[in-house]
Image: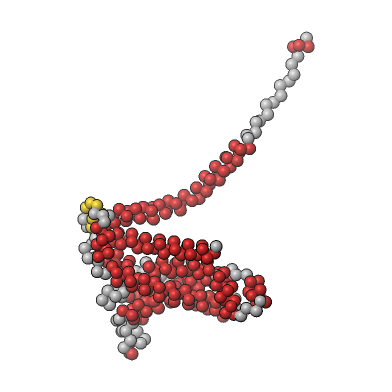
């Protein structure tokens, strides 16, 4: 056979590797899809049970919307002006602010004291931690009914002394604050205890070597390092106090003489009593939501500025 007709054997084709950039894009796309898959259930939950209800309430707040008549058209801003002109609006706002301040100061201060008491791990402190935390396992409605039985003149341990726990505005306020402190002090104690145990012992050792006493160590070491936990407790306490409803509805029904009516209870009354006007109740809900946003934004900004 002539040499010109002899051909070299064909080599198998080698696989062409994709460029590194394409591989990285695929990897990032896969990670992004995985992240969306994990976040989708939570996002769907927030959309259905938070975003959609807020949109509905916002729509109702600018509409003439009755409980039994439904939507009868837009009437903005009549609902908001009617809410502000309501004779119970400013008393409810004033009482809610007063209750929020009193509850937050007492609850955070007492919880911090309890956390400092049970900070060290030993047998007795373990018992105390459990004892302080047990009331937190009880629902707020159940705790309110329990305290209502205690405050009742027929069953109160101090009934024979003629003490009225719910008969006057001040007595009703402080009796309710006592209930909230008993119910939530253990929970906030636990949050602050976690923050205390997160502070390194080396910091306290350095403070002792520098000659700092107990008060100086608490003021210049413990409090600054405990600021994130204190901020969390303060936000939770402020939000919960501004949204107070169960305890006053079960203990005082807003009395005596509407002196303990809160903003949320006023929303309830507008929606289901006194005209059954869901539009006005929704307008007041939007006002309360705006107040909550302002308070939380100011707190977060203050915390960020102090950390900076």
Q: Residue furthest top?
A: 2
- Location of the C terminus (image quadrant): bottom right
Instruction: Give the left or right position of residue 174, taking residue 231 as reference.
Output: left
User: Residue at position x 51%, y 62% from top?
Assistant: 304
- Residue 57 visible in the snapshot: yes
Is residue 74 depicted above or below 169 in this figure? Answer: above
- Of 301 and 268, nearer the camera is 301
Residue 110 position, x and y percent, is 48, 77
- Residue 134 visible in the snapshot: no
Q: What colouring method underlies this structural image?
A: secondary structure
Q: Quadrant of residue 62?
A: bottom left
Q: Quadrant of residue 254?
A: bottom left
Is residue 225 depicted above or below 20 in this figure? Answer: below
User: Residue at position x 39%, y 69% from top?
Assistant: 241
Is residue 297 depicted above or below 199 in this figure? Answer: above
- Of 141 and 49, nearer the camera is 49
Residue 107 position, x and y percent, is 45, 75
User: Residue at position x 26%, y 59% from top?
Assistant: 79
Residue 20 position, x and y percent, is 63, 37
Residue 140 position, x and y percent, is 39, 71
């Amino acid at each position: 056979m002539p040499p010109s007709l002899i051909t070299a054997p064909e080599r198998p084709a080698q696989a062409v590797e994709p460029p590194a950039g394409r591989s990285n894009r695929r990897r990032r796309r896969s990670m992004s899809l995985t992240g969306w898959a994990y976040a989708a259930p939570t996002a769907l939950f927030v959309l259905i049970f938070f975003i959609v209800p807020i949109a509905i309430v916002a729509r109702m707040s600018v509409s003439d919307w009755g409980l039994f008549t439904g939507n009868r058209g837009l009437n903005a801003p009549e609902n908001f002006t009617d809410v502000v002109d309501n004779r119970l609006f400013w008393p409810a706002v004033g009482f809610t602010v007063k209750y929020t301040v009193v509850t937050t100061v007492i609850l955070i201060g007492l919880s911090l004291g309890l956390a400092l008491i049970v900070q060290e791990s030993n047998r007795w402190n373990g018992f105390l931690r459990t004892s302080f935390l047990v009331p937190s396992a009880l629902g707020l409605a159940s705790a309110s009914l329990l305290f209502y039985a205690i405050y009742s003149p027929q069953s109160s341990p101090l009934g024979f002394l003629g003490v009225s726990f719910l008969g006057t505005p001040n007595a009703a306020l402080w009796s309710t604050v006592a209930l909230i402190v008993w119910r939530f002090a253990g929970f906030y104690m636990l949050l602050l205890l976690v923050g205390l145990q997160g502070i390194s012992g080396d910091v306290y050792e350095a403070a002792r070597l520098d000659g700092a006493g107990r008060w100086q160590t608490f003021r210049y070491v413990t409090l600054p390092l405990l600021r994130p936990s204190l901020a969390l407790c303060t936000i939770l306490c402020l939000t919960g106090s501004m949204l107070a409803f169960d305890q006053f509805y079960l203990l005082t029904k807003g009395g005596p003489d509407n002196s303990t009516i809160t903003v949320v209870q006023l929303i309830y009354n507008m929606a289901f009593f006194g005209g059954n006007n869901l539009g006005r109740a929704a307008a007041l809900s939007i006002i309360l939501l705006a107040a909550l946003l302002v308070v939380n934004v100011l707190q977060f900004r203050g915390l960020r500025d102090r950390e900076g």
